[in-house]
Amino acid sequence: MAQAALMTQDQLIQGVAKHILTVDLFANTLPFVPTNAKSLVINRELTESGSGFVDINGATDSTGATVTQDTYPLGRIVGTVEVDEAYVGGEESGVRGRQTKTKSIVVMAVELRGIRRTGRLRLRHVPDVSGKSVVGFVTDVVAPGSVVKTDGWPGYSRLATHNYAHQVTVISSSADPAVVVMPSVHFVAALLKRWLLGTFHGGVSREHLGYYLDEFTFRYNRRTSRDRGLLFYRLLEQGVRTGHTPTAKLFLGAGRGPQPKPPNHPPRDHNM
């Protein structure tokens, strides 16, 4: 009996150690390793340690759900903020301005800290550029009393009613192009598109775009951090606050992975 109990304790300790190792690898790998290399790096380490192979695709998507927590609980951005939209996707013809048929719309809010310096970033995938979508985003991520700089799009017209100092620049009437009038959001948009294209080679599904935006935000907001331990701590802190998301649930929205079984129906009576 004592030997059986001892073996059970050893098995328990080994199981706990395996999970601790897995968590440690994820937390230390995600902030620093390029996304397309995570699967190789983590599984190599787990295999060498004897812990075996894990489903990295589902696990990294689950961790994407974890870094989602980075957006709001840690506080809304303040001060002077540039807000604009970016359009993610391939080329399309027959559209003008903010019109789109196939692209995904991403609203950006970039905190300004001096000349050509940016602070924190917030991103959101929205269905359209209506006032409900863009103003709702701003009220969620920007603290009241802040200065919000936008172009002349009518969707932003009600920002002043939400206790923001709204500064509007109509690009068509300006002597300078949009990239000069609002350089920070255009800089972030270019970085985001280059990251999506260079890392994922355009293979980002619309259903999971939000997770990729959250990871980009996590990386961007900690781009100047010199404390590796703090990145590890923040990722674990957000992981504790995040509910469990099964892998199957992550894939269902994209029509991939295991699909729910149809309900069982009683056999039909074919007797005439």
Image: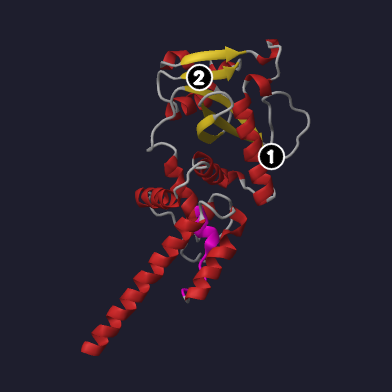
Q: Position of residue 25 (x, y in %)?
A: 47, 62
Outermost residue toward the right in this view: 93
Per the rendering, the mark at residue 89 is 1
Which residue is at a point 62% across and 56% down the rendered structure image? 36
Q: Position of residue 90 (x, y in %)?
A: 73, 40
Q: Position of residue 250 (x, y in %)?
A: 51, 53
Q: Dot 1 lies on which element?
A: loop
Drawn side of residue 133 relative to residue 173, left or right: left
Which amino acid lies under the numbered mark 1 shown in the image of this protein? Gly
Q: Answer with mark 1 or mark 2, whichever residue precedes in sequence.
A: 1
Instruction: Please name the residue that numbered disc 2 is placed on.
Output: 148
Q: Nearer the viewer, mark 1 or mark 2?
A: 2
Q: Dot 2 lies on which element?
A: strand
Which amino acid lies under the numbered mark 2 shown in the image of this protein? Val
- Image quadrant where one finds the C terminus: bottom right
- Image quadrant where one finds the N terminus: bottom left
Q: Position of residue 93 (x, y in %)?
A: 78, 32
**Marks 2 and 1: in contact by CB < 8 Å?**
no
Which residue is at a point 45% across and 56% down the rendered structure image? 27
Q: Which residues are magenta?
A: 51-61
